[in-house]
Amino acid sequence: MVDGGHLFVRQMDMLGLHEMFTLHGSHLEPIYQACIDYGFSIYDTRHEQAAAHMADGWARHTGRVAICAVTAGPGISDAVTGVLNAFLDAVPMIVISGRSPAMDDERLPLQSMDQMALLKSVTKWQHSVRQVDRIPEMLAMAYRQATTGRPGPVYLELPIDVLFQRVDEEAVTFFEKPNVAPPQGDSAIVEAAWRALSKAKRPAILVGGGMFSSSGYQELREVAELLGAPVFSNVRGRGCMPDDHPLGGQAFATLARMRRLGEEGRPDVVLALGARMGMFLGGAGDLMVPADATLIQVDIEAEEIGRNKRVDYGIVGDCRAVLRQFLAQKKARQPDRSAWDEAVRQTRERAAHALDDRLAQEDGPIHQHRLMTDIVRTLPPDAIYVADGGETAEWFTAVATVREPGQLLSHGYLGCLGTGMPFALACKAASPERTVVCVLGDGSVGFNVAELHTAVKNKLPVIFVVNNDEGWGMSKHAQEILYGPGRLIATELGKVSYEKVAEGFGLQAELVEKPGEIVPALKRALKAKKAALLNVMTDPNNVHPATKAASGALGKPPEDGAPQKETALPYYGKRDLSRA
Ligand SMILES: Cc1ncc(C[n+]2csc(CCOP(=O)(O)OP(=O)(O)O)c2C)c(N)n1
Ligand SMILES: [Mg+2]
């Protein structure tokens, strides 16, 4: 006779799920006890939001699913932001929580609430288990729901009076890992799309999370090389094509910069692979995907095809499967694309080095570009990078060279500060032999600061670097741009000694105030046998160009006296609000 916890963990084992990110609650005790018996890796956090962010970060780095296990009531409500972050970026995760006894419903037991309703809007699928012997079946179902079609978080609720029940293990059915071939695209459309790509003068490939999830990186490279098509990506797609490959166009922003070259900087045929046409690709505007370009959109989720854009060839299918279909097509002679490829390469290089004159600086205050460049140059090239913060993430991702998928983790559609520490801890758990650096804004540090203790306690020696501009920089700078001087409110933080906070949690920590101190401090952190934190004081007056662009400061100023049609909105730039 075994309890529901044993059934759950045995089924985890059969699905190859060996990691759990958690914060203890006795509702789930049978599961913890069974984890001891099975020898599973349990990572215990100081806040359930961090446990959810860790499971999210695990999947973003490894491409594999992990379990986030939290207690009933406040455990699951604390986890919601972390689950939502994964949901908006289609990252798979299995969330489980305890629940008050189902047999006590409406009798006001402890931590009783409608958890299903709370999780419904942030998960793909959710189920409350009511029979102990169906726990394995429902976990296998949760796994399939999380990993097939468009991936995403799913939720299993386990009432305490179900989980603690004992059954004869022999009478319970367990489930093998499903073996499902990812769907191919319609062959006629694939053929027609390939002909359009072959004839293109300036083809561009856009990759997003769908490309990452399909793991068809070799196929992507072959198709890009065959076509001479540069590859641009969002954070989740970054590294699917190595940044230092001649066709590595890096971020989507490179494509926006290309527009300055006029016609010669505009792609004529665009192949989008698992890249949704949302705000990060210019939304309904045509800054990155020109309205007159031929658009081939590949997505595993049919409803994504046509969002914000007129699509010429819509292909519902798995990115790797469709790339293989492309590779099986006839190879026609291709037009010469060297001028286009060179234009992309030059744009990419110019952007990466635009501020390099700041690198020779000897006196403080430290420029953020100097800090980020020193980090990238000092750490090994295969270091895993995590960036969290407003301008901080922008400064860092602009200089990082990402050579493989899952090497860079940062913000997605939730734009959620506080993800960095848990993401970095999950990366270190998955890749203990590699250096993991986590760059944080001084604002971002605060959300999950207690996870510094998780790093020490779980022996996850991450290097944390705080870009300390003494404020909510992106917010503060937008306030200054939009409202002028003397109008700062709720955006200043002042000087906080994060190195002392870190020391208290047991980290090796240092304050860095001069440019020349950055590299030696990083080298000491690399040698540390435990987690380390550098609190680096940077110049609060440096405004990142992304903040200027997002606040409409880079657009054309209105002519004197002319009625102003557009209003500048933080993050969204200048918009005509009469159409709202
Ligand atoms: C959870 C959350 N709360 C608030 C915001 C709004 N926000 C966006 S950027 C930003 C400032 C970030 O400050 P910091 O982390 O110090 O980075 P910096 O911009 O100073 O480099 C804020 C508050 C957010 N994106 N996420
Ligand atoms: Mg800041």
Image (tube, helix red, strand yellow):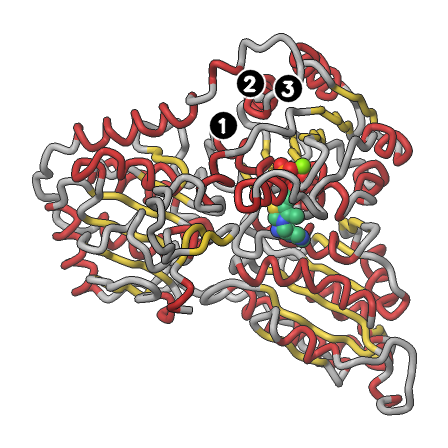
Compute the Cα span from label 2 to label 1: 10 Å
Asked where in the image residue 16 lies, by quadrant, the reply is bottom right
| Residue annotated with mark 2 | 377
| Residue annotated with mark 1 | 399
Q: How crowded is mark 2: few (under 14 residues within 10 Å), some or many (20 or more)?
A: few
- Please indicate, yes or no, whether residue 299 appears anywhere in the rendered image: yes
- Closest to the camera, between mark 2 and mark 3, is 3
Residue 449 locus on image (x, y percent):
79, 43
Q: Is mark 2 on a helix, strand or loop?
A: helix
- Rendered residue at 37%/42% (across/down): 557
Residue 107 locus on image (x, y percent):
91, 90
The image shows residue 159, relative to residue 512, as above or below, that is below
Residue 319 locus on image (x, y percent):
35, 55
Tell me how many marks there are: 3
- Rendered residue at 34%/47% (across/down): 206
Q: Which amino acid does label 1 sit on?
A: Val
Q: Is mark 3 on a helix, strand or loop?
A: loop
Q: Which of marks 2 and 3 is nearer the N terminus?
A: 3
- Rendered residue at 19%/49% (across/down): 269
Q: What residue type is labelled 3?
A: Ile
| Residue annotated with mark 3 | 366
